[in-house]
């Protein structure tokens, strides 16, 4: 969940590390630190708070020079937020940074205590450093391999050994690490964002492999000491894509990038501008043979994309589709087999619970297809087939353009599968594709509503409770709108299927409480209006969102947002943009950190 950077080469390591940690700030953290070789000894500087505070500390220690070091941003898991608990951790000859969780750290701590070794922090990471030091007899790789046998859990380590200046050892099991070799030196990080200023070509360190980084070379070996040449990957964006570009926040920038990210996602997959085509993704039509059931597994916003995908797929394919929360899925003894297509969705491709669900499906020999945004990610590598969302880097913790790019992929899958299955004709499919392409200009028009939405949010920002209601696809969008609002504005919000109001929820609707009512689906529009009248009768403050419907009884709402008219099935795209803007401006009016909400991280790589 946190940020890792390591560098050894021909530049000032301190600057490389600090710049890398700055690039990784979007992942969320509460403390930061670096360790580096200076005159053959390891110096460590760390602090609670922001990387800017760490930079001030480092700048005040200008007598230090270094060309090799490691850096880390930490979210507190084991032990509170303190300088002592911040990474890097040093014990004896070992200095270490760590992403992940060591599940058996307490047992190891007791064993080490019996040897007279005691930590100074409350972290599982220091226990790992202590274990490595206790096993180290001058051979770093041998010590790491011994430690692997003792450690349980998920981890990505970057390690300095005091008697090997200018060398970094790295290992991963679950948590991601990516690396590149350039003329300036060797760089490794938890995210490509920290590498992009040095190279667009990189590799993902394979799990349970050890990387040895020197100034001029990166050597990767398996646990049998066999040297391997990892697959090189290329990223097609540059540093400007990871900058705000004049916007006050990354989230607002990424909201405005959605027309282009959707265009980039669907255009390469539409043959002759008419029919879906996955040949460039190397997904053969046979994938869909003998599929009797689809299971979509994801977390958070990605799971909400799945809820929309479910409606689309069942409508077009006429086979059962279920959407499962990844953290629950594998503990429920799920019914999946060779006739099941399991679709996993993850922006990072490293979401721990989703990856675990994928591995379970592989054990059951289900066909697996993943929708991810990061090339070479764990989920991408372990899936039978992959559809990459071409959304580019998404820096804000709250997902926006990744969500609508995921929807685009799910729609394309539904059309392609239905065409192969024969449940729609080519003419039907062409019409659906045309409607999907129409989403792009519709979103561009929706973005012009920003000032109107901003004014509405002045009232919302003073509230502490809020409800979203909708039916059908609008209920799925209500779930997404609710999570967006609460994760960045800290307003308590809940999403309800509007037809359930009378079954208990209505008791919570009181005078002045905001209700965001989604009414974009024509087949349940009249029912939805009746539900809105129910909350209006309780004097709720109603914000109504409709799909091109402008002639609505004004007595049932306080604010009315009219979306550009699209078909019902395409309305989720424009609705999502409005809900993103509502969350964004509400958070801004509350004076909060929009891009880095408290307690949250961009990529959840631990269970």
Image (cartoon, helix red, strand yellow):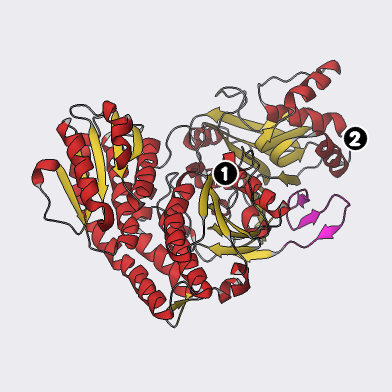
Comes first in the chain, label 2 or label 1: 2
Q: Residue at x 35, y 52 (%)?
A: 473
Task: Residue 130: give x, y in percent of width and height.
Answer: 78, 27
544, above or below 34, in the image? below
Q: Which residue is mark 1?
A: 326
Q: Is residue 521 visible?
A: no
Task: Residue 590: give x, y in percent of width and height.
Answer: 28, 33
Q: Nearer the viewer, residue 468 or 195?
A: 468
Residue 473 shown in magenta:
no
305, above or below 569, in the image? above
**How many residues crowd around disc 2 within 10 Å: few (fewer than 14), some, or many (20 or more)?**
few
Q: Is residue 603 visible?
A: yes
508, above or below 335, in the image? above
Question: Which residues make up the magenta segment?
Answer: 207-230
Location of the N terminus (image quadrant): top right
Task: Residue 451: give x, y in percent of width and height.
Answer: 19, 50
Q: Secondary structure at mark 2?
A: loop
Q: Which residue is mark 2?
A: 137
């Amino acid at each position: 969940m946190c940020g890792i950077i390591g560098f050894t080469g021909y530049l000032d390591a301190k600057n490389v590390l600090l710049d890398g940690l700055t690039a990784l700030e979007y992942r969320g953290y509460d403390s930061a630190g670096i360790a580096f070789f200076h005159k053959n000894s390891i110096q460590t500087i760390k602090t609670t708070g922001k990387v800017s505070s760490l930079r001030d500390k480092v700048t005040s220690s200008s007598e230090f020079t270094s060309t090799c070091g490691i850096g880390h941003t930490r979210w507190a898991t084991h032990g509170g937020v303190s300088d002592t608990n911040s990474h890097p951790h040093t014990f004896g000859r070992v200095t270490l940074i760590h992403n992940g969780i060591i599940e058996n750290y307490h047992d190891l701590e007791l064993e080490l205590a019996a040897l007279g070794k005691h930590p100074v922090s409350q972290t599982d990471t220091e226990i790992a450093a202590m274990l490595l030091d206790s096993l180290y007899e001058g051979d770093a790789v041998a010590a790491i391999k011994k430690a692997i046998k003792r450690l349980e859990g998920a981890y990505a380590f970057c390690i300095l050994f005091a008697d090997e200046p200018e060398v970094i050892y790295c290992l991963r099991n679950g948590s991601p690490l990516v690396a590149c070799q350039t003329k300036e030196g060797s760089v490794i990080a938890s995210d490509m964002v920290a590498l992009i200023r040095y190279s667009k070509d990189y590799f993902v360190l394979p799990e349970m492999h050890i990387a040895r980084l020197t100034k001029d070379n990166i050597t990767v070996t398996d646990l049998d000491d066999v040297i391997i040449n990892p697959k090189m990957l290329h990223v097609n964006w540059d540093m400007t894509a990871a900058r705000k570009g004049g916007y006050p926040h990354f989230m607002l920038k990424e909201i405005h990038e959605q027309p282009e990210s959707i265009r980039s996602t669907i255009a390469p997959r539409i043959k002759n501008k008419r029919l879906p085509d996955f040949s460039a993704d190397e997904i053969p039509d046979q994938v869909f043979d003998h599929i009797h059931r689809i299971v979509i597994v994801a977390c958070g916003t990605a799971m909400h994309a799945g809820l929309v995908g479910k409606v689309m797929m069942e409508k077009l394919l006429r086979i059962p589709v279920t959407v499962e929360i990844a953290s629950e899925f594998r503990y429920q003894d799920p019914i999946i087999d060779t006739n099941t297509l399991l679709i996993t969705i993850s922006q990072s491709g490293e979401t721990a619970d989703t990856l675990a669900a994928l591995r379970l499906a592989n054990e059951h020999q289900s066909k697996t297809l993943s929708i991810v945004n990061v090339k070479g990610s764990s989920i991408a590598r372990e899936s039978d087939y992959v559809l990459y969302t071409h959304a580019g880097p998404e820096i804000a913790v709250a997902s926006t353009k990744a969500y609508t790019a995921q929807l685009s992929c799910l729609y394309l899958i539904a059309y392609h599968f239905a065409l192969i299955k024969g449940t729609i004709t080519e003419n039907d499919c062409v019409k659906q594709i045309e409607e999907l392409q129409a989403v792009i200009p519709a979103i561009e028009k929706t973005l012009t509503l920003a000032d109107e939405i901003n004014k509405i949010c002045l009232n919302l920002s003073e509230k502490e409770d809020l409800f979203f209601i909708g039916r059908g696809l609008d209920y799925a969008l209500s779930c997404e709108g609710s999570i967006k609002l609460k994760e960045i504005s800290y307003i308590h919000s809940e999403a309800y299927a509007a037809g359930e109001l009378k079954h208990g929820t209505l008791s919570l609707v009181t005078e002045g409480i905001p209700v965001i009512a989604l009414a974009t689906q024509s087949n349940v529009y009249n029912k939805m209006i009746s539900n809105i009248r129910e909350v209006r009768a309780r004097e709720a403050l109603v914000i109504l969102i409709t799909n091109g419907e402008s002639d609505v009884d004004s007595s049932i709402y306080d604010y009315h947002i009219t979306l550009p008219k699209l078909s019902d099935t395409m309305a989720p795209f424009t609705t999502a943009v409005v809900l993103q803007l509502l969350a964004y401006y509400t958070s801004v009016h509350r004076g909060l950190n929009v891009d880095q909400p408290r307690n949250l991280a961009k990529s959840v790589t631990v269970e």
